[in-house]
């Protein structure tokens, strides 16, 4: 794998590190930068909302990935034959723990190539949540994880890899 440093002119982004198989084009670099900006915007909105939710419910809120077509094991709504999205299966929605970004009061861009989700954890060391941002660049799937909580090892820069086909 190659390591490329992508320096941006956007304040607060600094240097992104890309671990992937191919050299990125300027358009692909911009896609990672755009996803990083979106991740930071989500985190800015999420911090106070998660604190309020945790204070009232005793746990953090998990949020489903947006915009992906669902597989049979996914908890995101599948598409109907006409292409319209149907309601999530209420049975698969764990009561009071799994929501959409709309449910959580988080504003996302109307059009984006980035797919965020929020996962929660509770361990003997404490609890917290991660925001995972995923995007596709060519054949590679790129993922970045931002951690809020005690398990700092969960934090991860952009890692890109070609998925294995089974």
Image (cartoon, helix red, strand yellow):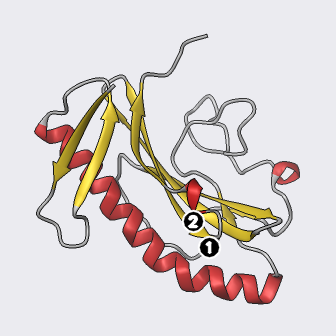
- Residue at figure coordinates x 67%, y 45% from the top left: 76
Mark 2 closeness class: few <14, some 14–19, many ≥20 residues within 10 Å: many
Viewer-nearest residue: 111 or 155: 155
Up/down of 107 relative to 118, above or below: below
**Residue 29 rendering spot, x and y as whole percentages:** 20, 43
**Residue 118 rendering spot, x and y as whole percentages:** 60, 60
**Residue 77 rendering spot, x and y as whole percentages:** 67, 44
User: How far apart are the two marked residues, 1 and 2, measured between alpha carbons?
Assistant: 5 Å
Q: Are marks 1 and 2 in contact (CB under 8 Å)?
A: yes
Up/down of 118 relative to 157, above or below: below
User: Any mark on residue 101, and which?
Assistant: 2
Up/down of 20 relative to 17, above or below: above
The residue most toward the top is 166
Viewer-nearest residue: 101 or 126: 126
Up/down of 47 relative to 82, above or below: below
Residue 109, can we see it? no
Q: Is residue 153 left or right of residue 9?
A: right
Residue 163, can we see it? yes
Q: Secondary structure at mark 2?
A: loop
Mark 1 closeness class: few <14, some 14–19, many ≥20 residues within 10 Å: some
**Residue 49 rendering spot, x and y as whole percentages:** 60, 82
User: Any mark on residue 132, and which?
Assistant: none
Which part of the image, by quadrant, shows the N terminus? top left
Task: Name the residue beneath numbered marker 1.
Answer: 104
- Residue at figure coordinates x 31%, y 24% from the top left: 21
Q: Secondary structure at mark 1?
A: loop
Which part of the image, by quadrant, shows the C terminus? top right
Viewer-nearest residue: 19 or 46: 19
């Amino acid at each position: 794998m190659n390591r490329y440093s992508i320096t941006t002119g956007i304040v607060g982004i600094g240097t992104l590190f890309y671990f992937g198989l191919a050299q990125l084009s300027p358009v692909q670099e911009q896609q990672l930068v755009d996803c990083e900006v979106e991740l930071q915007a989500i985190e800015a909105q999420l911090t106070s909302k998660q604190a309020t939710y945790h204070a009232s419910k005793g746990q953090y809120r998990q949020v489903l990935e947006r915009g992906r077509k669902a597989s049979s094991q996914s908890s995101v709504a599948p598409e109907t034959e006409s292409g319209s999205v149907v309601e999530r299966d209420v049975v698969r929605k764990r009561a009071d723990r799994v929501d959409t970004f709309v449910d959580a009061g988080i504003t996302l861009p109307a059009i984006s190539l980035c797919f965020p989700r929020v996962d929660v954890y509770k361990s003997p060391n404490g609890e917290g949540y991660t925001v995972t941002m995923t995007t596709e660049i060519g054949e590679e799937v790129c993922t970045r994880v931002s951690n809020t909580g005690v398990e700092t090892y969960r934090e991860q820069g952009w890692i890109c890899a070609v998925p294995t086909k089974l």
